[in-house]
Every structure is written in C-alpha cells, then in structure tokens.
Image (tube, grey):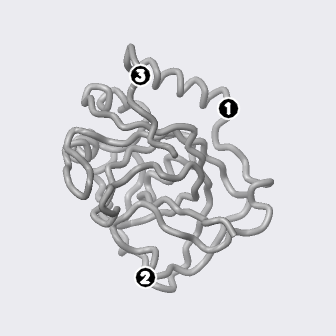
C-alpha cells in the first residue's frame, strides 16, 4: 500500500485553494519538521485543514472563526487533493513580496516566515510550490488521531475511498494554471531558484 500523505494548512487557506483564489503554497515549516527542516518532499497529497495558530490578522482574505484545535476522535473532513508540479526555494525578498496577488497570507505573516530561522531552515528563505487542486466527488471523513498533531507539515493518513482519483475534478483548468505558471516565471529575469520536489 502506498503512503497516503496529508499536508497541514490553515482552514482559511484550504478554503482559498478550494475556491481557486489561490494556487500556490508558501511554507517555512514547523518546529517538528526534523533535522533537515521542511521541503516539498511530496508531489501528491491531500489538504488537511487545521485551526492551530490561526489568527485573523495572519491572512488578508477569508473568514477566520476562532476554534480549538482538533481533539482525538473529532471528525475530519478531507475535500481536496493537491499535486505540486514544481516547488522552489526563494531567497530574494523582492521575489517573495511580488507573490502577494497570488495568495491570501498577510504581508507580515510571509515576512515572519521568510525571516524565521531554526530546525534546518535558514533566515531569508521560504518555500514556494505551484499546486494543482482537485475537489473530491464526496468528502472523505475519518476520526482525528493523536498522530496528526504537532507543529509539522506532513502527516500520514488512512487509506482514502476507492476510485477517488477517477471522480475528483480540477478547481481551475489547465489553461489557468499554465497562465499562473507563466506569471510566476516572469517575476524574475532568471530562474527563481532550484526545485525542491523529489
């Protein structure tokens, strides 16, 4: 059986990805990412919505309702799957700042992530991934487990419903995704950075 991976992201950002408002992910990583720090180590994963650390001033758009973090046994509802065609590490703040039209994070949130240093991650860097988001035909539900907790990005999920891949539909079409990729590539006269995807 293949490992089924979940990517933990704030519910409000999951909502932006689900609506097509956002098709990139910006991540520095959490304190439990391991010695090497965060990377977009998986090209295919499910969005796992979280409430942890979310405050209204950390995003510029979307509805943020203060809720406690998930507890063991709470029902988790997975509605979207993601593929990352490419991921890069940015070390130029001007390039990072130019991404503002493409996401809902506040400028201060992105700056804080860019400047943060620790757990194998250096100050003055942030990871960017272009993502292709697909909505599952029916929500996938399972109970929250203790193994899903902690300040880390990647978690292992149970086996998903059969045939979900055949019935999932893209949130935005390939032409729109290609246009976004072109716009991201035009942020700099040269390559933005090396690929992070394995």
Mark 1: which secondary structure? helix
For the residue pair 40 and 144, the one nearer the viewer reads as 40
Up/down of 80 relative to 156, above or below: above
Residue contact between numbered discs 3 and 1, judged by CB atoms under 8 Å = no
Farthest residue to the bottom: give it.
73
Residue neighbourhood size for the residue with mark 2, other residues' Cα within 10 Å, grouped as few (<14), some (14–19), many (≥20): few
Where 104 sits versus 71, above or below? Answer: above
Residue with the mark numbered 3: 191
Element marked by disc 3 = loop
- The N terminus, quarter of image: bottom right
- Name the outermost residue toward the top: 189
Mark 1 touches mark 2? (CB < 8 Å) = no
Nearest to viewer (mark 2 / mark 3)? 3
Give the CA separation, mark 3 to mark 1: 22 Å
Residue bearing the label numbered 2 = 71
- Cα–Cα span, label 1 and label 2: 37 Å
Q: Is residue 190 visible?
A: yes
Residue identifier under label 1: 174
Dot 2 or dot 3, earlier in sequence = 2
| Secondary structure at numbered mark 2 | loop
Point 55% across, 78% down: residue: 75
Q: Position of residue 123 (x, y in %)?
A: 19, 44
């Amino acid at each position: 059986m293949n490992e089924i991976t979940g990517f933990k992201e704030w519910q409000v950002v999951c909502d932006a990805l689900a609506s097509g408002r956002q098709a990139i992910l910006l991540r520095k990583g959490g304190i439990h990412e391991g010695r090497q720090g965060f990377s977009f180590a998986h090209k295919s994963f499910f969005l796992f919505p979280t409430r942890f650390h979310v405050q209204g001033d950390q995003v510029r758009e979307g509805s943020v309702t203060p809720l406690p973090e998930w507890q063991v046994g709470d029902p988790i509802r997975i509605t979207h799957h993601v593929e990352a065609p490419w991921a890069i590490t940015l070390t130029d703040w001007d390039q990072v700042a130019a991404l503002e039209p493409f996401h809902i994070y506040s400028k201060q949130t992105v700056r804080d992530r860019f400047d943060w240093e620790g757990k194998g991650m250096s100050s003055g860097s942030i990871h960017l991934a272009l993502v292709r988001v697909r909505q599952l035909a029916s929500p996938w539900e399972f109970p929250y487990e203790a193994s899903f907790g902690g300040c880390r990005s990647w978690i292992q999920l149970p086996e998903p419903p059969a045939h979900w891949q055949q019935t999932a539909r893209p949130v935005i079409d390939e032409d729109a995704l290609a246009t976004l990729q072109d716009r991201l590539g035009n942020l700099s006269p040269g390559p933005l950075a090396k690929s992070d995807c394995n």
